[in-house]
């Protein structure tokens, strides 16, 4: 049975922290593939991503191009409307019926799982790979059937929000990004002012 990892998020922009987490999960969990699923807007967050859906997809494809073990799936963006992790996992389970699925999340997201849509049913369909985060305990927050595999990842104190803020302040961001993504942001003038995708979709 193939083991498939999934990393969801806005990826606004995708950064090296995302790639490191995906690679460590790939290695330590013995995964056959890690799918990145970009979303448009989380029901648990306010506001839409600043970069358009097309630009976020382009940055992801550029960042993942050197890594055959990683792949982008765009069905959340194409579907439009708010989409939840339960729906996304159901879609993946139908596409990959012979595969064992692992959703990769940080400990902060694990703590928020009771707020996720149909989380008990979700926990029956997929296992979670938990990444420790400062200030959060990686433990079951009271979700039935929850299966969490903890893996250690060297601290990656990088956030897309910080990167966007640095761009707005004309501070360098090349140390946080794949080279192609850094060049894309500069070429497109991203994050200089607020931009929205006009698409509403997210796998949480």
Image (tube, rainbow, N blue to C red):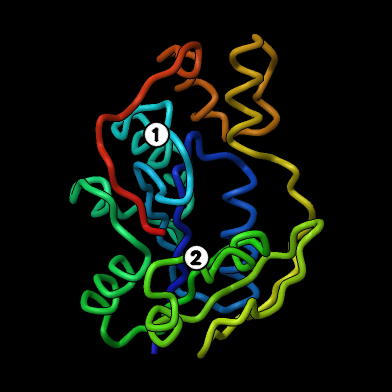
Please name the residue shown 48% across and 44% down the image: 45
How many marks do you count on the picture? 2
Q: Position of residue 187 (x, y in %)?
A: 44, 13
Q: Secondary structure at mark 1?
A: loop
- Quarter location, residue 50: top left
Q: Which residue is mark 1?
A: 48
Q: Is residue 138 left or right of residue 96?
A: right
Q: Is residue 57 left or right of residue 112?
A: left
Q: Which residue is mark 2?
A: 115
Is residue 91 positioned above or below 76 on the image? below
The quarter in which the C terminus is drawn is bottom left
Please name the residue shown 60% across and 17% down the image: 167
Q: Residues within 10 Å of mark 1 (few under 14, many from 20)?
A: many
Front disc: 2 or 1: 2
Q: Position of residue 142 (x, y in %)?
A: 61, 81
Check if mark 2's residue and mark 1's residue have beta carbons within 8 Å: no
Residue 56 tag number? none
Q: Is residue 134 left or right of residue 170?
A: right
In the image, 188 versus 180, the foreground residue is 188
Is residue 166 positioned above or below 148 on the image? above
């Amino acid at each position: 049975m193939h083991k498939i990892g999934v990393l969801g998020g806005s990826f606004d922009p995708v950064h090296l922290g995302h790639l490191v987490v995906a690679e460590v999960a790939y290695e330590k969990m013995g995964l056959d593939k890690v799918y990145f699923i970009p979303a448009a807007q989380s029901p648990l967050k306010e506001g839409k991503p600043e970069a358009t859906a097309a630009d976020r997809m382009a940055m992801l494809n550029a960042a993942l191009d050197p890594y055959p073990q990683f792949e982008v799936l765009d069905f959340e963006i194409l579907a439009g409307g708010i989409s939840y992790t339960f729906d996304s996992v159901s879609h993946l389970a139908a596409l990959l019926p012979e595969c064992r699925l692992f959703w990769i999340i940080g400990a902060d997201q694990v703590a928020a799982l009771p707020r996720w849509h149909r989380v008990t049913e979700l926990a029956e369909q997929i296992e979670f790979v938990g990444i420790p985060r400062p200030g959060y305990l990686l433990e079951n927050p009271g979700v039935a059937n929850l299966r969490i595999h903890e893996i250690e990842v060297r601290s990656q104190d990088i956030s897309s929000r910080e990167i966007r803020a640095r761009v707005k302040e004309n501070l360098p961001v090349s140390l946080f990004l794949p080279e192609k993504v850094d060049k894309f942001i500069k070429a497109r003038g991203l994050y200089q002012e607020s931009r929205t995708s006009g698409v509403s979709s997210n796998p949480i």
